[in-house]
Amino acid sequence: MESNMNEEMKKIDKCAPEDCSSCGADCSSRINLDDKIIQITTDDGEQIDCLIMLKYVMESKDYIAVMPLKNNPEGDIYLFRMIKNRTELENIEDEDEYERAAEAFGIEMEKAQQQK
């Protein structure tokens, strides 16, 4: 399964971890993994509701795949690395890591489909 990530989604607004209150952002990079839908913010400030498709581990790192719920006719899926005890999202900047994460996502989705 091929995953696409547009340039706007590659960066999430982030607070300085040592002082979140100083940046004035709405902590859009913080997530609650118990939720089925999370909200992410693009570089231009647009907030997008996304369905959590899958949480998985690859190479001892935690990843998450999300799909925007609106204005997504092609069904794009965005992949992020989870950090800070799995409460924040981080962009996958390295292309090789992103490709491995996308391949691992495809494998995990196939396994999930087979278990149904």
Image (spheres, grey):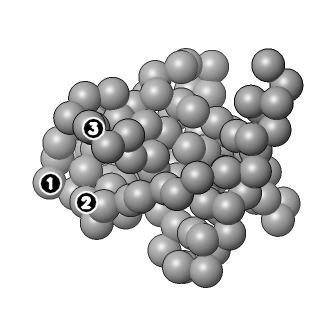
Do the CB atoms of the residues marked 1 and 2 lie less than 8 Å apart?
yes
Q: Counting other residues with Cα less than 10 Å from the Cα at mark 1, is it few (<14), some (14-19), or many (20 or more)?
A: few
Q: CA distance from mark 1 to mark 3?
A: 18 Å
Whether residue 64 is visible:
yes
Going from N to C along the chain, the mark reached first, 3 or 2, is: 2
Q: Which residue is mark 3?
A: 72
Quadrant of residue 94 within the rendered picture: bottom right
Q: Where is residue 93 shown, x and y percent of the image?
A: 48, 74
For image coordinates 74% across by 30% down, the residue present is: 113
Q: CA distance from mark 1 to mark 2?
A: 8 Å
Q: Secondary structure at mark 3?
A: loop
Viewport quadrant of the C terminus: top right
Q: Which residue is mark 1?
A: 44
Which is in the foreground here, disc 3 or disc 2?
3
Whether residue 18 is visible:
no
Q: Where is residue 61 shown, x and y percent of the image?
A: 76, 58
Q: Which residue is mark 2?
A: 8
Q: Amino acid at mark 1?
A: Asp
For image coordinates 25% across by 29% down, the residue present is: 70
Q: Where is residue 63 shown, x and y percent of the image?
A: 65, 51
